[in-house]
Every structure is written in C-alpha cells, then in structure tokens.
Image (cartoon, rainbow, N blue to C red):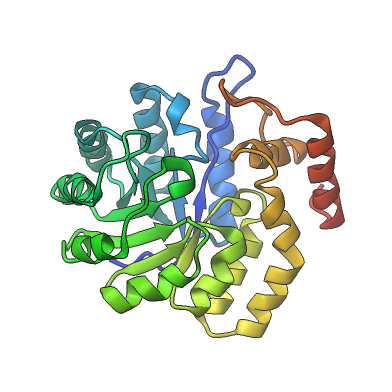
Amino acid sequence: MSLKGAHTAIVTPFNIDGSVDFAKYRELIEFQIDNGIDGIVPVGTTGESPTLNNTEHMKVIEQTVQIVNGRAKVIAGTGANSTSEAVELTMLAKKLGIDATLQVTPYYNKPNQEGLYRHFSAVADLGVPVVLYNVPGRSCCEIAIETVARLAQHEMVVAVKEAGGDVARVRQILDACDIEVLSGDDGLALPMMRDGAIGLISVASNVVPGVVASLVHTALEGQWDAAQLLHDRYIGLFEAMFIDTNPIPVKAALAMQGKIEEVYRLPLCSMEDALKQDLREVLSGLELL
C-alpha cells in the first residue's frame, strides 16, 4: 500500500466534563474529508492519547473507521513504550479495520537500536502496515538510519514519519532503503517533499485541511511554485501550532473557530493569555476566524 498524500493527526475533542465528544469528532472528520484530506490519524500525540484509557482509545479508533467508511486511510496510533502493550493495542485496532498503524518510538525507557528493531518487528509481525514514528524530541530516542533500513526489509513496515526536524534524513533514508517517508512537521513538509517525501502527517490541517491538502497535492504533481506560495502564506500558522505544547495551540484554534470546546486533560491545560492572543492574531490575519 502507499500512504502518499496529506493526512491529519486529528485532535480528540472533549466535552466540558472531560469526556470524549464523539458528536464533534464526527463533524471534525467530515470537515477533513470534505476538504480533500487523504488520511485520518487518530489517537496520536495530537489526539492526546497519553490521557485516554484503553477503552476510550479503542472507541476513538472504532468511530474513526466507521465515520471515514473507506473515504480516506485510517492510520491509528497504537504505539506504546511497552512492546506487549503496543502489540495488544494494534491487535485490537486491526480487528476494527484500520489501514495502518502509527508506531511511536518507545519513550522514557530509551531502548537501544536492537531493542527498537525487535519492538517494531513484533508489531509488524501482526500483519498490519506499520508507519514508524521518529520523534526524538518527545521520546528522547531516535531511530537510526541503519535501523530504519533493517526494518524496511519487513513487508509490513511501509513508511516512516519523520518529526525530528532534520530534512537531511529524508534523503539518507531513501538512499539506504525502499520505504515511504512522510513529513511529521507542517513547516518542513515542502522541503522534505523536494527531497523525496511523499506526504505529510499534519497538525495544521485540523484548522486548514484544504490548504494542507492543496500544498501536498501540488507538490506531488511537481507544481513546486504553487506549493511554495501556499507554504509561504501559511508558514506563520504552521509555526503557531507549536507556540505551546501540541495539541494545546491547535485545540485553542479550533475552539476559536467554534468547532470544539477548549478542553484538555491534565497535565495539559490552556496556554497563557499572551500566547492565545498571538494565535488569535495569526488566525485573524489569515481570515480564519
């Protein structure tokens, strides 16, 4: 399978009482599909997966599959820093009909490269296409190029999401093995695609799915000037999505647009007023409010 295109790392909206707001979640997914997004990535970092219990986690994935109903890919976050937990979550998600699984690099326990290889291989052996998620800023653990190349020999390891801020890794990976590379950073999507990435797993597309889809699709068509114009116009928004810990800014932006309640689960909480005002000004400048 190919995961070429624009995929949204979708937020998990909460009701005022902190429960998952599945009615709003359906509206968010329909908004994404209506605006040309190729895939939905539920319960990743942006979906606040660390604060969802396993029952909620599976319910969000189940609802995603049902709502999407084949109109886009579903790449479900089922990673963990315990291999047995990642395997269990992935087995449950496989039964729900996901297209692929996003597997974050195990965090906090910081395995060595052999441990990473065995961890990801155990998940891939379940028979679900795996997207490796390299995000050393959150996990304190990077997947070495050699380990990516080793894992790429497994028929179910189909892509790697690069969210380490290093554009050079795209070409290094593609020179080392045959695997698809997805940018994990909106602001680096275009330069990564110039170097051979085939798409993006986006945070900003929660707010501007049509823009992100157009940027990725025009780049895939080789219309680099048109893609650059979109990048230049919206780079301020891409950067604003990270003025505080993700997904705080993107949920604040969606709340400003009236799409969700601005509710988080601790330890995440609302950003300070000055940052919120900065975000509002960016949205207003792009006529998104």
Residue 252, percent from left and from top: 71, 36
Q: Does residue 123 appear to the left or right of 50 in the view shown?
A: left
How many numbered markers are drawn? 0
Indicate whether 262 appears above or below 140: above
Q: Can the viewer see residue 48 in this picture?
A: yes
Q: Does residue 279 appear to the left or right of 211 in the view shown?
A: right
Residue 278, percent from left and from top: 83, 44
Q: Nearer the viewer, residue 112 or 162?
A: 112
Q: Does residue 45 appear to the left or right of 261 in the view shown?
A: left
Q: Residue at x 42, y 43 (%)?
A: 140
Q: Residue at x 32, y 78 (%)?
A: 175
Q: Nearer the viewer, residue 244 or 91?
A: 244
Residue 124, percent from left and from top: 19, 51
Indicate whether 47 appears above or below 228: above
Q: Residue at x 84, y 35 (%)?
A: 274
Q: Residue at x 67, y 80 (%)?
A: 226
Q: Nearer the viewer, residue 191 or 39?
A: 191
Q: Does residue 270 appear to the left or right of 146 in the view shown?
A: right
Residue 253, percent from left and from top: 72, 41
Q: Can the viewer see residue 198 in this picture?
A: no
Quarter of the image with the N terminus in it? bottom left
Toward which corner of the image does residue 263 lie, by quadrant? top right
Residue found at the very far top of the displayed protein: 17
